Image (cartoon, helix red, strand yellow):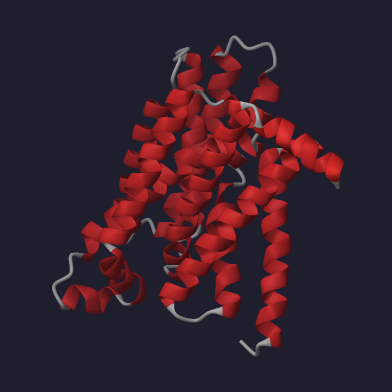
Amino acid sequence: MSGLLEKLSLYLSFPFVRYALYVGVLIALCSSLLGVTLVLKRFSFIGDGLSHVAFGAMAVAAVLEMSNEMPLVLVVTVITAILLLKTGQNTRIKGDAAVAMISVGALAIGYLLMNLFSKSSNISGDVCSTLFGSTSILTLTIQEVWLSVALSVLVVLAFVLFYHKIFAVTFDESFAQATGTRADLYNLVIAVITAVIIVLAMNLVGSLLISALVIFPALSAMRVFKSFKAVTLCSAVFSVCCALLGLLISILAGTPVGSTIVAVDILAFGGFSLAGRLLGR
């Protein structure tokens, strides 16, 4: 045990490890806040769809040899989130079909572009690391860390400021509209915030595992708590603890960051499910 503590202390002495922990915790917190709303609105799959769009945007940035790909990926993902919201309201293309269509299209085009134009000697490795996460979270620059902090603060502030409106739109959108709430506007806010979270989470767990950060904390909290506020708070604590534990295990054991965090989420979900049954929930 003392050997593990000494090893952990040694790793924490490096700035890039501390940066990874800071950003990982912030991403987990932001993901959990919107997760409850997305699960209750039956729109959990939007995270998966937008993550594939972000992968396509990253492929374009790689082809263009951009030194900082995050601005392009963020803009493209936000625009796609807005288009998904509008397309999902079209009676000819339902919401789930629109997400699936854009998701598969972006993933295929991104991989095609990387094969046709990328100058990397290890395309398969680059694609695998982007889809499933890699050690990129440990190579963050101080500028990327501050950008992640700024975006995370904006997400938390937006959720706190619009909490009551988001609550109303989540549970009864028709009633919210009848009482004068601009449901379309707050749905747009939810979509944009989700897009920002997806872009932030790309470096942590990869594009294929992002939905886990959104879904597992919310579903786990729902096993034990029933009120929206209690579920949201529990989801946030759950997500932060699992992300922190997963990062530490990954650093100490040398396992893939994204997969390790998701594995911890799955185990914790099992524990919460058992606790819910024991409590008769």
Q: Going by the image, does 215 lie left or right of 92? A: right
The residue at the far bottom in this view is 280
At a point 34% along the width and 33% down the height, the residue shown is 75
Question: In which quadrant will I find the C terminus?
Answer: bottom right
> Residue 215, image x and y in percent?
56, 60
Closest to the observer, 214 or 126: 214
Q: Please give left or right for residue 175 compared with residue 143 in the image.
A: left
Q: Is residue 271 visible?
A: yes
**Residue 102 lies in quadrant:** top left
- Residue 149: x and y, percent? 41, 38
The image shows residue 178 at horizontal and vertical percentages of: 17, 78
Rendered position, 219 above or below 118: below
Task: Locate residue 241, reporting x and y percent.
Answer: 61, 56
Q: Residue at x 53, y 21 (%)?
A: 113
Question: In the rendered image, which quarter is residue 115 located in?
Answer: top right
Viewer-nearest residue: 15 or 48:
15
Residue at 25% across, 76% down: 174
Q: Is residue 41 above or below residue 66?
A: below
* 69 or 280, nearer to the observer: 280
Whether residue 90 is visible here, answered yes or no, is no
